[in-house]
């Protein structure tokens, strides 16, 4: 059954800084994702805080927001059959040290903070996160 889904993907500052943006986009495309929208931006700290608000009570929240706003990022709307879960599988575990072979975080991630990519964790959050960056 057809279940095309859109999800939000972010190529994080550590990967943009290492010029991995095109390589990572090719990984998505080769796995059958269409990149529907994309833009390269740098967030203000306040915007990163808003984006990661679900994590505001976590001990790593401040560092996380400093990090996401520390340099340019590439935000993309990806589309594929069951795209939300497909993207999470392709990214791999949050901590690159725990990520499976063949995943983006295993190949490119440096640490749990510098884990190269973000992806929406549910269909509902995908809508919210896509709106956050691409609401016209
Ligand atoms: P991301 O998928 O972007 O969502 C929140 C981010 O917080 C996560 O990736 C990690 O990069 C970062 N993070 C830092 N420390 C932790 C932690 N202990 N547990 C989960 N996420 C963490």
Image (spheres, helix red, strand yellow):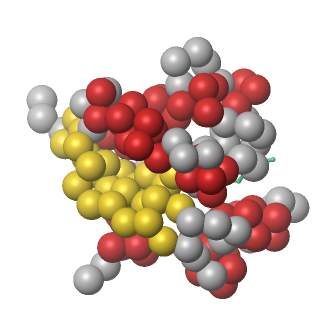
Q: How many marks?
A: 0
129, 41: nearer the viewer: 41
The x and y percentages for residue 8 are 40, 55
Residue at coordinates 73% horizontally, 63% vertically from top-left?
A: 67
Q: Residue furthest front?
A: 19
- Identify whether 49 is placed above or below 91: below
Extreme residue toward the top, this view: 101
Tell me: residue 13, above or below residue 19. Answer: below
Residue closest to the far right: 59
Q: Which residue lies at the image location 18% right of the left edge and 39% below the top edge?
A: 3
Query: Quarter of the image containing the C terminus?
Result: bottom left
- Quarter-of-image position of residue 108: top right
Q: What residue is shown at x 33% (from left), y 73% (from top)?
A: 134
15 vs 131, left or right, is right
Question: Which residue is nearer to you in this view: 15 or 55?
Answer: 15
Considering only vertical position in the picture, is 47 above or below 99? below
For the N terminus, the image quarter is top left
Which percent across, then down, holds residue 132?
Answer: 43, 74
- Image location (x, y in percent) of residue 115: 67, 43
Give me the residue at 60% from left, 26% from top.
Answer: 107
Using the rendered view, name the quadrant where residue 33 is placed: top left
- Residue 32, percent from left and from top: 25, 31
């Amino acid at each position: 059954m057809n279940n095309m889904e859109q999800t939000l993907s972010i190529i994080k500052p550590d990967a943009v800084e290492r010029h991995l943006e095109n390589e990572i986009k090719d990984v998505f495309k080769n796995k059958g994702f269409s990149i529907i929208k994309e833009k390269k931006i740098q967030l203000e700290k306040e915007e990163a805080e808003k984006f990661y608000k679900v994590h505001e009570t976590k001990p790593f929240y401040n560092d996380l927001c400093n990090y996401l706003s520390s340099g340019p990022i590439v935000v993309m709307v990806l589309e594929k059959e069951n795209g939300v879960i497909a993207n999470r599988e392709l990214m791999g575990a949050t901590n690159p040290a725990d990520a499976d072979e063949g995943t983006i975080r295993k190949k490119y991630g440096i640490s749990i903070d510098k884990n190269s990519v973000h992806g929406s964790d549910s269909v509902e959050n995908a809508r919210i996160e896509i709106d956050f960056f691409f609401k016209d």
